[in-house]
Amino acid sequence: MKTALVTLLTLLVMAGPIYGQQSLVLSSTRNQLAVVSGKVLSEAYQRLGIKVHIDAFPAGRSLIMSNNGDVDGEVYRVKGIEKTYENLVMVPVAVNQVEVVVFTKGVTFSVTGWDSLKPYTIGIRRGSTFIEKKTIGMKVKPVTKIEQLFLMLDLGRNDVIVTSRLAGLMAMKELNIKGVHILEPSIVTKNVYHYLHKKNSHLLSDISRVLQDMENEGRIKEIRMQAISELF
């Protein structure tokens, strides 16, 4: 009887959360893509018994803090930033998608890739590494906050803005900006991934497995659609 009780208790412990009451602090940018990605990660880590706290910073500062180990990792970034920020390790299951589009007020042209932006003055958010690389050599005006981009566009200081569809639409809604529209099609749609600081590499296998389970279940897509519905 005693042996059976010990076995049962052992099984219950094994079935419980792997990491007990461990917690992580992740950094991210201040936009709705981060909100949605954060919801995905919060549920994923909850399945491992890990609590997640997300601190929002300007995009560039967020990456520096993640890379320095001041926080435990980055909520989302495009693939490849580990080549520059070498202390970050990518979790190889996408937590979200970013659709990069052109916002404009009065200027109209056919969007046929990045080169079609060259004649225009382009507003981008500082720290958006993928967009920064794709617009090198163009007439770019970087700012820290996405709200600044739309205020500058509204005042005629930029011809276009290049940012994510979701973040841009939310900024327009909050600022109550009228007369700005999106030029279709999108420039590109990219998967975005969660990054851990290398000090947390021991979590890589487990969080990858859980995120893959959520992807297979359709749960990541469900969280994304629910969050977008709540926002708009």
Image (spheres, rainbow, N blue to C red):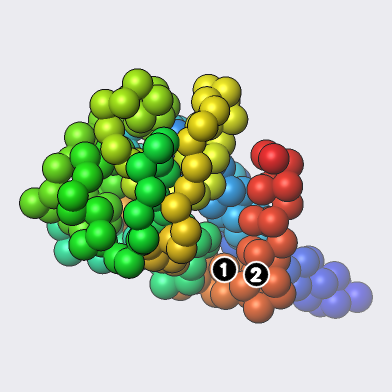
Q: Are marks 1 and 2 in contact (CB under 8 Å)?
A: yes
**Disc 1 marks which amino acid?**
Leu
Name the spot of residue 28 as percent of width and height, x first. Answer: 41, 41
Residue 185 visible, this angle: yes
Q: Is residue 163 left or right of residue 37?
A: left
Q: Quadrant of the N terminus?
A: bottom right
Q: Nearer the viewer, residue 211 or 179?
A: 179
Q: Amino acid at mark 2?
A: Met
Residue at x 48% of width, y 67% of height:
94
Residue at the image point whose x is 31% and y is 53% from the top: 197
Q: Would you say 56 lies left or right of 41 here?
A: left
Binning the other alpha carbons within 10 Å of mark 1 as few (below 14), some (14 to 19) or many (20 upward) gives many
Location of mark 2 (residue):
214
For this rendering, which residue is in front, 154 or 96? 154
Q: Residue furthest left?
A: 137
Residue that appears at 62% across and 72% down = 215
Residue 27 in sight here: no
* Residue underneath mark 1: 211
131 above or below 161?
below
